[in-house]
Amino acid sequence: MAHCKFILVFFLNYFYHFFDINFLIIIAISSFGSALSSLWFYQGVETAHIANKAQLYSKLLTVPAIYIFVNSEKDDIYFLLINALCVLGANLYLLYRILALSMVELKFTTLNEQFKYLKINFTLFISRISTYSFNGGIPIMLGIIYGNEAVAIFSVAEKLKNIAQVQLTL
């Protein structure tokens, strides 16, 4: 998902004159926070409850902040900023825990090494990016063709489907 947000940031870079600079900064913060996601690590070492707690606490801090700072429709930028900072804060904390407490060392790779891994996993990469593009494109096309009400109905149906999938896999 973070890859898609980075693509969005680069896309918006070419059309920045259509957008408010504050909006672009918030997208960049949200993208950076999503890119720092280390849920994969906590799931791998079977301590996902730590990541879940961090995300829960950041959401619990977000709700009062939204009620304090968002008072009208004009404050929509604050709502976006608070959510972006929530994602960034939780993921920075989880990254700190990995580096400081788990004694894991990060290694930065060269561009050639990244292309080597991309070449090996190209089919997986294409299938994942296709799925994200398809799933992300449905609400956009619904909104363009049928309007906000169709997007809301689709979103509710999608959430219910996800809840059912989670319940069935437990």
Image (cartoon, helix red, strand yellow):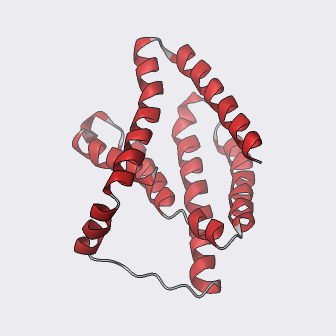
**85 left or right of 11?**
right
- The front one of 11 and 70 is 11
**42 left or right of 128?**
right
Q: Is residue 24 visible?
A: no
Q: Residue at x 25, y 37 (%)?
A: 17
Residue 14, given in percent of the width and then of the height, sits at 22, 43
- The front one of 14 and 102 is 102
- Give the answer, above or below, for where 126 lies relative to 108: above
Residue 100, given in percent of the width and then of the height, sits at 60, 85
Q: Can residue 74 be seen in this view?
A: yes
Q: Which residue is drawn at 65% across and 25% down?
A: 156
Residue farthest along the bottom direction in this orientation: 103
Residue 56, given in percent of the width and then of the height, sits at 73, 56
- The front one of 103 and 60 is 103
Residue 92, given in percent of the width and then of the height, sits at 56, 68
The quarter holding residue 39 reads: bottom right
Figure disc tally: 0
**94 left or right of 148?**
right
Q: Which residue is drawn at 41% across and 30% down?
A: 137
